[in-house]
Amino acid sequence: MSKHQKEMALLKEHLGKHQLKYTRQRELILDAFLKQEHITAEELYHQLSRKDPHLGLATIYRTLNLFCEAGLAQARHFGTQTQYDNVSHKGHHDHLICTECGKIVEFENCDIERLQEEVATRNGFIIKTHRLELYGLCSRCQH
Amino acid sequence: MSKHQKEMALLKEHLGKHQLKYTRQRELILDAFLKQEHITAEELYHQLSRKDPHLGLATIYRTLNLFCEAGLAQARHFGTQTQYDNVSHKGHHDHLICTECGKIVEFENCDIERLQEEVATRNGFIIKTHRLELYGLCSRCQH
DNA sequence: AAGTTAATTGAAATAGGTTATCAATTTCAA
DNA sequence: TTGAAATTGATAACCTATTTCAATTAACTT
Ligand SMILES: [Mn+2]
Ligand SMILES: [Mn+2]
Ligand SMILES: [Zn+2]
Ligand SMILES: [Zn+2]
């Protein structure tokens, strides 16, 4: 019995709808990915290389992009790399990022989301996605 | 008499404080940059290549990064490229971006900014900067 | 269970945007 | 005017991500 039954079901549902296959690699990557809040392709590659030395980096990238399309992950460009956010059980959220130590705090704020909608409506837009990142110093790095 | 006297003064102030020099290239790039709301290094390069075919792309990148440090510009990763925002006279603002036609609308919203501060405070953070981007369809692209 | 077809994989090449290198040039203060 | 230090342009290098392609694998058909 693997954990992540619900997420695996979601993935299989997406695969079924798009004539895609459920592979050993996709299962491996899914399990590792779901243990993280967010991770880069390189980091995941290094983690998994220990277990399966033959897993290719391209497969990691391809699979993470697949997770995004399936709604399990959300790509977010941060610095030079792309962070893949695990949104499978937490849902949408935004980020506070400490520019000193790299600490990341996730948050949700309905009021902000509502105001975003207002801004969009006022300008004739319909929002599909958004990104909100607050950069600064965490409590430990303020001294 | 060049326009952009105020911005040029700001730049010279920054240069003075950091033992940097005021060069012909920096003046050229500043004038071209200030005519835009936001622009990529490549776009600026192509614009300026017509006037001065010997201007190097590396110089454009270096100078735009300098403008960021001087507070005249603000880098914003959008898609695969970096957009350099002209914040010299408009000040901070956020963006509505149409994913269909690429249209960009700039906006400011004090309420959102205030709520951001609240979120940060609640988590012990002090915000230095932030980015808020709303992606969706503009009025023309909704049909 | 075996065969068939199309998707997937890993390795390597390629792409694309940005930065580093370095000799020649330019700025600017003395 | 002179000289030290910063800057420039051309190009190489870098880094992340995607593409290519032959071999493999998953899953449907018989
Ligand atoms: Mn997150
Ligand atoms: Mn702008
Ligand atoms: Zn910190
Ligand atoms: Zn549009």
Image (cartoon, coloured by chain):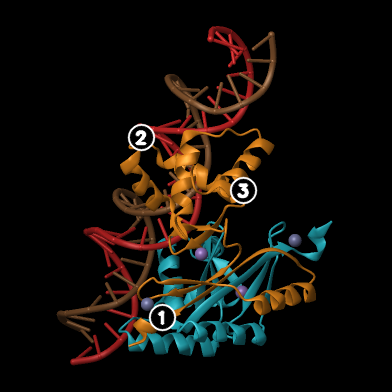
Chain colours: A orange, B cyan, C red, D brown
- Which residue is label 2 attached to? A54
Left or right of A22 on screen, residue C13: left
Label 2 or label 3, whichever comes before in sequence order = 2
Q: Which of A136 and A28 is in front in this view?
A: A28
Regarding residue B2, the answer to whether it shows in the image is no
Label 3, secondary structure: give it. helix
Q: In this view, does A124 lie above or below A70?
A: below
Please determine if labels 3 and 1 lie on a single subunit. yes
Disc 2 versus disc 3: distance between alpha carbons? 25 Å
Q: Quadrant of ligand 4?
A: bottom right
Name the residue: 80% across, 70% down. A124
- Which residue is label 3 attached to? A69
Name the residue: 61% across, 48% down. A69
Q: Nearer the viewer, residue A127 or B29?
A: A127
The response on whether ligand 3 sits within 8 Å of label 1 is yes
Contact (Cβ within 8 Å) of mark 1 with mark 2? no
- Which residue is label 1 attached to? A138
Inspect the image, locate mark 3, and give the three-letter code of the amino acid beneath it: Glu
Name the residue: 43% across, 55% down. A40
Subunit bearing disc 2: A
